[in-house]
Amino acid sequence: MFRLPVTRLSADDDLDFLGRAACSLSDMVLRFIEDPAAADAFPDSITSGSDEEEEDQASVEENKAFWDEQHQLLQATLYRTSSIESKIRQATKEALRETLDTICCRCSRAAAGDCRNCLRTEICNRLISLGYNCALCKSKWRSSENTLSGEHTFLEVLDNSNTKKGEIRVIIELNFRAEFEMARASQEYNRLISFLPEVFVGKAERLRALIKILCNAAKKCMKEKKMHLGPWRKHKYMEAKWFGTFERSSPGMLPARGYGNRPPKPRASMLTFDLSEAMPGLHCTAVEVL
């Protein structure tokens, strides 16, 4: 057996050892800054925390930039307008103001303002009386691989006053903001939606641009909340409401129920059904009821 000599460190030696350790750590940091490949020399506990913080910060900045851009695009799209849009928008506002005070609901609803069908019909009639080529439009589409089936009713004005530009399609949606509201939306999405008008009056091209902005925002909102975006919120479904196949009818031609211009089938009642005409050979005998 041999005894190994044990060397005790003095206080000065301890300080010298700690100094060398600190220098070696600082050297590692400098090598990491100068040479990114030197990051492999660091333990995971040193690098992972800083990487996650940088990723979180980048994600926050990216989200902020996205919502700021959507706000700018939305406001720029809404504020641009043409003379024909302004005229129809003003006429629609006046018609709404007069209608809500005088309309009598034909559907026996408690309040006229609660019946969208009667309100749309009355607004359409008033715009027609002002000389606008206004009509009720009912769109209907079938389900496909990427979208669900559905239907929607809105107002449309066709303007042919400008022969150079051709026919201009102006869409009137009386419940526009509600079409894009979501129950579990984020604060950023709700703030974006708050800029939408309750009643939209604008060209088809403007509406198409707004749909794209709002559907992108809805998709981003659900992704941030880690929730599934419903198929009725997707871009194709929303576009089908105003840009799908639809029937254009005047208020008097549009059926109250169903789809198309077919007249409703007459309903027969046993109280008014004449059996003697339907069955000539039938003989009836009077019976006294006690």
Image: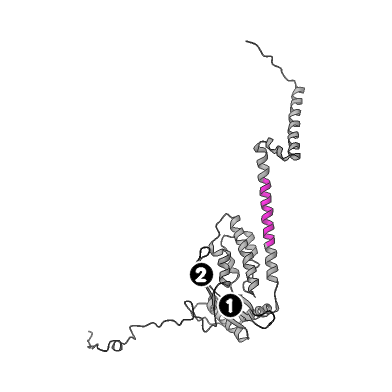
* Total labels drawn: 2
- The CA distance from mark 1 to mark 2 is 17 Å
According to the picture, the residue beneath numbered tag 1 turns out to be 155
The tag on residue 150 is 2
In this rendering, position of residue 175 left or right of residue 36? left
User: What's under tag 2, amino acid-wise?
Assistant: Gly
Quarter placement of the C terminus: bottom left
Which quarter of the figure is the N terminus placed in? top right
User: Would you call the spot at circle 1 few (<14 residues within 10 Å), some (14-19), or many (20 or more)?
Assistant: many
Residues marked 1 and 2 touching at CB (< 8 Å): no
Q: Residue at x 62, y 67 (%)?
A: 211
- Magenta stretch bounds: 53-69
* Residue 257 on the magenta span: no
Q: Name the foreground residue: 71 vs 203.
A: 203
Nearer-the-camera pick, 126 or 48 = 48
How far across and down, in percent of the image, does residue 86 sit? 68, 78
